[in-house]
Image (tube, helix red, strand yellow):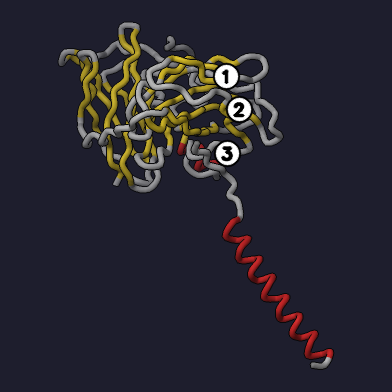
Amino acid sequence: MNVATRLGAFVAALGVVFAAAYGSGALVSPVANTQETGHESGGAEAPGHGQPSGLGAADAAGTGPGGLAVSADGYTLRRLSPDPRPGATGEFAFLIVDAHATPVTQFQISHDKPLHLVVVRRDLTGFQHMHPRMSSDGTWRADMSLPEAGDWRVFADFRPEAADHQVILGVDVPVAGTYQPQPLPDPQGAAQVDGYTVTTHGDLLAGRTSRLSLTVARNETPVTDLQPYLGAFGHLVALRAGDLAYLHVHPQPTTSAGPAITFDIEVPPAGTYRLFLHFQHDGVVRTVAFTAVAT
């Protein structure tokens, strides 16, 4: 074989190697967001009151649905605590670190708090909403009790001082033991808690802003003296069944003290959601849950 022929064969082989390498690189290329598996009085209205945070804010920031990843928008939730035991109360500690792995210590007040922590089991039971305390080194701590075994999801909902939108990060927290997932309740138009009945009006429309009104009654009498909780007469957290995409919405600014609490809520593509409503009356914060289908 002469020199020209051998050189041509070498170049052709080299092209095949580079093509294979390029294809492999495309298959294993990392994505921008990494998924990790592994009670208060009301106050002044928060900045951006009445506007959705969570899914809506995340979509506007170009990062996709909120709470699906442990890292987003240059921030990471770093869990410090070991896996909890079922039914035991323990301290859940974590950091929010920036792109340089430096703990973040400056946060804007959003919905009356610098950070909201939402906890739910993956079958959408055991919902909790708490507000941890932060030490000077940026470590957040909350007393947490996860009553049953299973995979739990913890969401941190916050706005760093340097950010112009809410950041929602999520991390899985496994609780060892026999896991007995509960079926999601069928969609219903009303839910009860402690003698209160909350009735829903309106439908969720996928990919559009939907108006959802929730009417509160006590012993069949409309409640007209709801009290502010975290700066509003109601709070709505929606979680999508399956991936637990997260949405936190405040009511319209014109919402009165009852009986209706009205939300404008935008959900992504069609799916089944579990809606958790907080409202405060007679000094007690109560939570009711609904199943809704966005079509």
| In the rendered image, the vertical position of residue 251 relative to residue 258, given as above or below | below
Asked which quadrant contains residue 285, the reply is top left
Is label 3 in contact with label 1 (beta carbons under 8 Å)?
A: no
Which residue is tagged 3?
A: 72
Check disc 1: other Cα within 10 Å, few if <14, some if 14-19, many if 20+.
many
Q: Nearer the viewer, mark 3 or mark 1?
A: 1
Which residue is tagged 2?
A: 96
- Quadrant for the N terminus in the image: bottom right
| In the rendered image, the vertical position of residue 39 relative to residue 205, given as above or below | above
Residue kind at label 3, given as amino acid type: Ala
Which residue is tagged 1?
A: 140
Disc 3 secondary structure class: strand
The reply to whether residue 131 is in sight is yes
Q: Position of residue 107 (x, y in %)?
A: 61, 22
Query: Most extreme residue toward the bottom, as rendered?
Result: 2
The Cα–Cα distance between marks 3 and 1, rounded to whole angstroms, is 18 Å
| 118 relative position to 289: left or right | right
Q: Earlier in the sequence, mark 3 or mark 1?
A: 3
Q: Position of residue 120 (x, y in %)?
A: 39, 28
